[in-house]
Amino acid sequence: MTSGANTQRLIGPAKIAGGVVLALLAAVGLVLLADASPWEAAKGIVEGAFGDKYRIGETFLRATPLAIVALGVAPALRTGIFSIGSEGQLALGAITSTAVILGLRDAPGVVLIIVGALAGAVGGAAWAFIPALMRARWKASEILATLLLNYLAGLLLLWLLRTHLGTSENVATPRSDNLPKDALLPKLLSETRLHWGIVLVPLLALGLAWWVRSGRGLAHDVYSTLPGLGARMGVRDSSAVLGTMVVSGACAGLAGWLQVAGVQGTLYPSVAGGLGFIGVLVALLGGLRPVGIIVAAFFFGALSTGADGVQAGTGVPASLATVLQGGILLAAGLLFAARARRVRRTLMARSDEPTPQPAPAVAP
Amino acid sequence: MNVTDLIFWEIVLAGALRLATPIAFAALGEAIVERSGTINVGVDGIMVAGAFAGVYGANQGGWVTGVLLAAAVGAGLGLVMALSVLWGGVDQIVTGIALALLGTGLTSYLFQVWQPSGRSAVLIPLAPTIKIPGLKDIPLVGEALFAQNLLTYVCVVLVVATAWALRRTRAGLAVRASGDDPAAALVRGIRVRAVRTSSLAVGGALAGIGGASITVGYLGSYSDGITAGRGFIALAVVIIGRWTPIGAALGALLFAGFDSLSLQAQGGTIKGLPVEAYSALPYAVTIIVLVATARRQRAPRSLGRPLVAER
């Protein structure tokens, strides 16, 4: 290996360290701007996320929908399909499960829970089917179709809460009737809000782990970088798009059901509340792998409960969490990019073949 | 006033041009960015930041300061994207998503630090409205074309100027060559990476001004979620407008036309459907047009591809 390659190898980690340091410096600067001590804020984040049993429960509670959304969207992202519509799919899942549960309110608890989960998954999948069809059939950009459909889902939710699904009680903010007690998921940990829905996370992670290792998953991986070879391995564009996007929609819909039946016990306008969008980030940060995603979801969950704690304690706005999440994704992106370059160079050193040209990330 | 009155359509048309301005600014910037070969999915985050920078700047030193600050902030965020994508090698879409989040999060944070909860209504001087006497009294289109905010006229001039510059100047050629065939461009001595970097800075500045043209142009105040996804609409209209500045501006006008109609519906002038359906109309129309025009698109040939040719 020439000295030129060695210098390049040194530049990689330097860039990453630079990214992380820059993100942290920016965060410190922001905290100082709010007239607070960065040390206190950092302590506040840790205490807010792990300070007592209730807060630890909250951290897991926040991480659950993020992990479910992320695990669901990972196959699409691995195939090179940028589905960013989990936000709307989550809202749709929450709507359909609420509607079905309220419609069957006198049914036994087991039925309500199973049917609620199914309805959520179907609702989310149906909403995801729209942009999937647009992409598969008419080659419309799935990025834009999914993003724009998020806004339509939000408006649909507002309309339903004002009309068919709205409670007849006199309430300040629109919401649905309370779900019957039997439809609610039991608590997993006393004195916290953590519910049994979290068991879906390891199950879905196992599913993703299996898929990634299967021939199908490998073919999708190949398809995202070398579409020609992937096609020869049996990946058809339309079925890949429809399949992966519907799966991501079903998972987001499940997360929507959990927010209604596990956390709030009612449908409300901000049920998605950025969970879908940040879930996609979690998937990317987790390197689109099951374990990585769980770690990333836990990390982002802790950041957001921690930031809430900081806001209560020091008055530093909780949106610090959002800033940190965006900054960390950028820094992590640099990390992955550097690693990919290293792998490419190693491959190049081992064979005399030229590096394959990376395919476009998207075909709008 | 009802749908059959001339004045109703006068108001809708005038509103359409006003509401199209922010999207047209951002879409113009994104058209330049995409013609040079990069996709910036984070436009919405930059618009939000620009909207806030506009309010802050206008509050400190008048509307010109606001617009300039918004442009500077937007250019800065565009450079962050360039650093990450062109110099750091990060995926464009991932960076764009991070930027969208960073822009909204950062802005929400700074806004709360500047105006702790409860004091949200900051009054700022707006950019002036230019009324051309005589012409503005033309029925139907007079108010729309000759009594607009100064920023709207600036936008029209910039759109036309950019369309010309992209086609007729050396800089325009460099931008197009970088987006279509970076390898050949490099051979001809065009510094592709530098061209894409400056395009991102210019595009960011325009998106920032687009954000400011909401707050400094007509709204007069900032609140979280102020763009309602207009940055994403800007991305869509660039595609709908086939990557040309004028096409993108017309796409912006299409969205804004329906947006303006839905505002009238919210005001109770038109009835029949629920308010939410009218609010959904502009987004739905954009999606439908996006799908309808998708097959006939000719994107810049290297759009979205990482810059492989090193230096």
Image (cartoon, grey):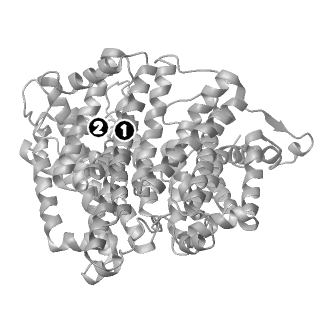
Q: Which residue lies furthest to the right in this view?
A: B134
Instruction: Specify the label residue B37 is tagged with.
Output: none
Residue drawn 26% across the image and 58% down it: A74
Q: Relative to residue A214, is residue B24 drawn left or right?
A: right
Residue B55 versus residue A89: which sits nearer the camera? B55
> Which amino acid is tagged 1?
Leu
Could you say whether the residue bearing mark 2 is in a helix, strand or loop? Answer: loop
Residue A303 versus residue A97: which sits nearer the camera? A303
Image quadrant of residue B242?
Answer: bottom right
**How busy is the neighbourhood of tag 2: few (under 14 within 10 Å), some, or many (20 plus)?**
many
**How busy is the neighbourhood of tag 1: few (under 14 within 10 Å), some, or many (20 plus)?**
many
Could you say whether the residue bearing mark 1 is in a helix, strand or loop? Answer: helix
Task: Tell which circle, 1 or 2, labels the residue nearer the N-terminal end.
Answer: 1
Q: Which chain carries label 2?
A: A
Residue A208, compared with residue A133, is above or below; it is: above
Labels 1 and 2 in the same subunit: yes
Q: Mark 1 lies on which chain?
A: A
Residue A242, compared with residue A103, is above or below; it is: below
Q: Are marks 1 and 2 in contact (CB under 8 Å)?
A: yes
Which residue is the site of mark 1? A161
Which residue is the site of mark 2? A267
Residue A26 versus residue A140: which sits nearer the camera? A26
